[in-house]
Image: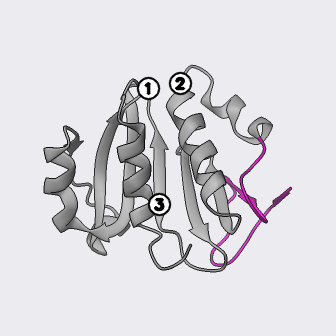
Amino acid sequence: MAANKRRGKASKYIIYSEKGLLCDNQWKLYLDGHPIELLTELRRQLKEISSKLIEKFNYNSRYFGYCIGDDKDKVYIYVQKERLRIDLCIDRENEENLKSAGFNVKYVNNYQGRSGWLTGWRVPHNTKKINVVVKWLLKAFEGNL
């Protein structure tokens, strides 16, 4: 079930879940023409890891945001035609580890980037390293699961 607004400034483009993940019919239509297999698998694995996970979707910018309970957002996944772009609430020093694992990271100077997040992690839709991606997503939630 989605609520129209939640903590903080409300946005007319954001759909919030009250608990857990959004239903597929709340976001799939907005991603027509975008590959969603990787996204669907990441969402499935995140759902299995914590029942406290809360998801939001910005249908204008095509990103998903994740937090645990009432905590602030820790992960943003932007759905692009060629890839997923992921911003994580972990130190930028981790960029080299992601590059060593074969990923491309191009810093994004957005609010999260200026706050010290690792931003601009580019994950191709056809990656075979789903377990690596999930591992890093979970790192952003450490201490909250």
User: Furthest-right residue in view?
Assistant: 1
Q: Position of residue 112 (x, y in %)?
A: 36, 67
Residue 3 is left or right of residue 134, and the answer is right
Residue 124 is left or right of residue 92, and the answer is right
Asked if the residues shown at circle 1 and circle 2 are in contact, with their CB atoms under 8 angstroms apart, the answer is yes
The residue segment tinted magenta is: 1-23
Residue at position x 69%, y 69% in the image: 52
| Label 1 vs 3, first from the N-terminus | 3
Q: CA distance from mark 1 to mark 2?
A: 5 Å
Q: CA distance from mark 2 to mark 3?
A: 20 Å
* SS for callout 2: loop
Q: Quadrant of residue 20?
A: bottom right
Q: Which residue is mark 1?
A: 81
Q: Residues within 10 Å of mark 2 (few under 14, many from 20)?
A: some
Q: Which residue is mark 3?
A: 75
Asked if the residues shown at circle 2 and circle 3 are in contact, with their CB atoms under 8 angstroms apart, the answer is no
Residue 4 — which label?
Answer: none
| Label 2 vs 3, first from the N-terminus | 2
Q: Amino acid at mark 3?
A: Val
* SS for callout 1: loop
Asked if the residues shown at circle 1 and circle 3 are in contact, with their CB atoms under 8 angstroms apart, the answer is no
* SS for callout 3: strand
Which of the pair 51/84 is nearer the observer? 51
Q: Nearer the viewer, mark 1 or mark 3?
A: 3
Which of the pair 10/84 is nearer the observer? 84
Residue at position x 13%, y 55% in the image: 96
Q: Position of residue 14 (x, y in %)?
A: 67, 55
Q: Which residue is mark 2?
A: 34
Asked if residue 21 is among those painted magenta in the image, a careful observer would answer yes
Q: Position of residue 15 (x, y in %)?
A: 72, 54
